[in-house]
């Protein structure tokens, strides 16, 4: 089921940590690396844009971002964010502002200084972004205090604000490069350990090591190439044939085959969840009874067995996985219950018919979605599958609301403010289901602003209960984005995307 959702990453625009480094290296040592080596990574889609403020975050563009750009803070799924491009981040006594002091001596790849003015430029640009701007609506002002200090003023207290600065909203691009809104999409300029070299459409993106990188941990590769291989079988075949050094996948059959042939597959998993996003403004899908019936009619365990999705959590049913300390078992979980689904549909009293979109690229995705559509048919719901050939069209249709239902993949952030607020709060930056519920808004507002963890825990438990009773979209399973790699690839860490910042290649 998780494999339904290759490529699109529709979680919080602030939920995925970007920039910095991770401690959880599982393959190789930097001392063993060939610093003249190149690495080729197979991605399951071509990025739609390389402008952090000009697109929604996806697995494809996020993987490329990771080497080029850096954020004000850095974190991962296991620990709180810490300063990165920002040297210090301090909350005021009244909790209504944060003061950031920047690192000294950092420049963008084009020579533009990284300073307070650049930070203000980026935050103001993100605030008006049609993709990510609503994630910063709580900011009322960004003021330059001195050349290296910025003060950010909030409308209400925001406990998890540092998490936002570690995600896409906190990513810094060169102000000079963003002067042309079209050019910046295909010519990214950041502060990271790699510089952008070329983008050959429908083929690859090439990055080159930034020898002037400001940080201590220099890139371990001379260059890094991202090949666009949208077909899962073709991508795995290329890895086995030696045409790729590594690839991303969420298909368990690919993991098993690569493992049997001696490739690295035991990379620490990054949590995400496969889901069926439902447009809550569409007739039929605007009724919670119908949405709950759709969820109750799917036998997740049977699908997991049929499609061999090992190790995935099919029980959570919420955007927060059962392994998270923030998880709360909902009081009214919607288990597989086709008769209950029929009763809800009878109470609704109207025919239910809609189209569900799927990104082209994996036969197992097609087969799994066909099985889900058949489950719906058995309870009287008519769904038609529409295949979408490219990621850009796919993402734009979701962001603009030009869809009924869509197979989608979202990342789980380290804090529920980023995992839940963005997707479930009215007007949230990734609320592509257009869900709106005053009780949910109140719970998420309390979780965002409460200073103590116990109050936040209670608020997010209520939010998870409301998710189950309202079912704005359907969580199928929590799973993992995995990296498959040859034995000579080193520095593979737990990261949201391919870990370009630590990856290397063993010296021969």
Image (cartoon, rainbow, N blue to C red):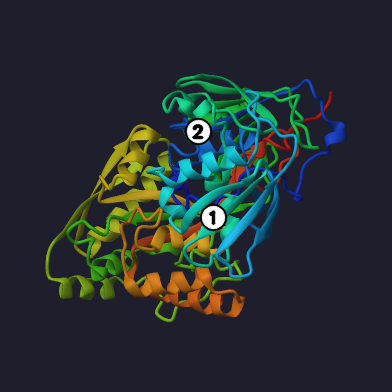
| Label whose residue precedes the other's in the sequence (1 or 2) | 2
Neighbour class for label 2 at 10 Å: few (<14), some, many (≥20)? some
Total labels: the figure holds 2
Residue at (38% x, 34% y) in the render = 392
Q: Residue at x 71, y 34 (%)?
A: 106
Residue annotated with mark 1 = 479
Image quadrant for the C terminus?
Answer: top right
Say left or right for 489 vs 59. Answer: right
Image disc number at residue 233: 2
CA distance for labels 1 and 2: 20 Å
Quarter of the view holding residue 378: bottom left
Image spot of residue 428 (x, y percent): 39, 57
Percent of width and height locating residue 161? 57, 59
Q: Residue at x 33, y 64 (%)?
A: 472
Taking depth in this image into account, of 295 and 79 the one nearest to the observer is 79
Q: Is residue 457 left or right of residue 277?
A: right
């Amino acid at each position: 089921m998780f494999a339904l959702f290759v490529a699109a990453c529709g979680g919080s625009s602030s939920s995925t940590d970007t920039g910095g480094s991770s401690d959880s290296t599982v393959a190789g040592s930097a001392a063993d690396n060939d610093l003249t080596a190149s690495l080729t990574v197979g991605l399951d889609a071509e990025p739609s844009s390389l402008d952090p403020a000009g697109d929604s975050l996806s697995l494809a563009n996020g993987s490329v971002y990771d080497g080029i750009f850096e954020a004000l803070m850095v974190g991962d799924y296991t620990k709180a964010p810490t300063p990165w491009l920002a040297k210090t981040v301090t909350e005021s006594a009244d909790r209504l502002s944060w003061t950031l002091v920047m690192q000294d001596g950092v420049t963008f790849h084009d020579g533009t200084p990284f300073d307070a003015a650049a930070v203000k430029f980026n935050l103001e640009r993100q605030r008006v972004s049609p993709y990510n701007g609503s994630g910063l609506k709580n900011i009322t002002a960004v003021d330059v205090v001195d050349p290296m200090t910025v003060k950010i003023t909030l409308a209400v207290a925001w406990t998890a604000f540092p998490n936002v600065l570690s995600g896409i909203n906190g990513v810094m691009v060169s102000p000079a490069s963003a002067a042309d809104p079209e050019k910046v999409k295909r010519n990214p300029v950041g502060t990271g350990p790699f510089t952008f070299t070329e983008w050959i459409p429908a083929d690859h993106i090439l990055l080159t090591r930034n020898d002037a990188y400001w940080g201590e941990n220099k890139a371990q590769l001379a260059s890094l190439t991202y090949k666009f291989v949208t077909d899962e079988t073709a991508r795995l075949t290329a890895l086995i044939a030696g045409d790729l050094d590594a690839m991303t996948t969420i298909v368990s059959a690919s993991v098993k085959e690569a493992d049997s042939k001696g490739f690295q597959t035991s990379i620490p998993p990054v949590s995400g969840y496969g889901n069926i996003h439902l447009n809550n403004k569409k007739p039929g899908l605007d009724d919670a009874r119908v949405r709950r019936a759709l969820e109750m009619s799917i036998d997740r365990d049977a699908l997991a067995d049929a499609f061999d999705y090992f190790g995935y959590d099919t029980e959570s049913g919420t955007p927060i996985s059962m392994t998270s300390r923030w998880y709360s078992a909902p009081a009214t979980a919607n288990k597989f219950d086709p008769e209950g689904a029929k009763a809800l549909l009878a109470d609704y009293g109207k025919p239910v018919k809609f189209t569900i979109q799927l990104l082209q690229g994996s036969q197992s995705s097609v087969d799994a979605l066909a099985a889900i559509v058949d489950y719906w048919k058995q309870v009287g719901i008519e769904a038609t599958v529409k295949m979408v050939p490219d990621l850009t069209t796919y993402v734009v249709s979701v962001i603009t609301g030009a869809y009924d239902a869509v197979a989608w993949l979202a990342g789980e952030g380290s804090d529920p403010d980023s995992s839940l607020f963005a997707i479930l709060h009215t007007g949230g930056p990734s609320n592509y289901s257009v869900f709106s519920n005053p009780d949910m808004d109140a719970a998420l507002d309390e979780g965002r602003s409460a200073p103590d963890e116990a109050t936040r825990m209670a608020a997010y438990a209520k939010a998870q209960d409301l998710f189950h009773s309202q079912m704005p979209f359907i969580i199928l399973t929590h799973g993992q984005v995995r990296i498959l790699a040859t034995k000579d690839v080193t520095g593979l860490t737990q990261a949201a995307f391919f870990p370009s910042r630590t990856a290397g290649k063993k010296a021969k």
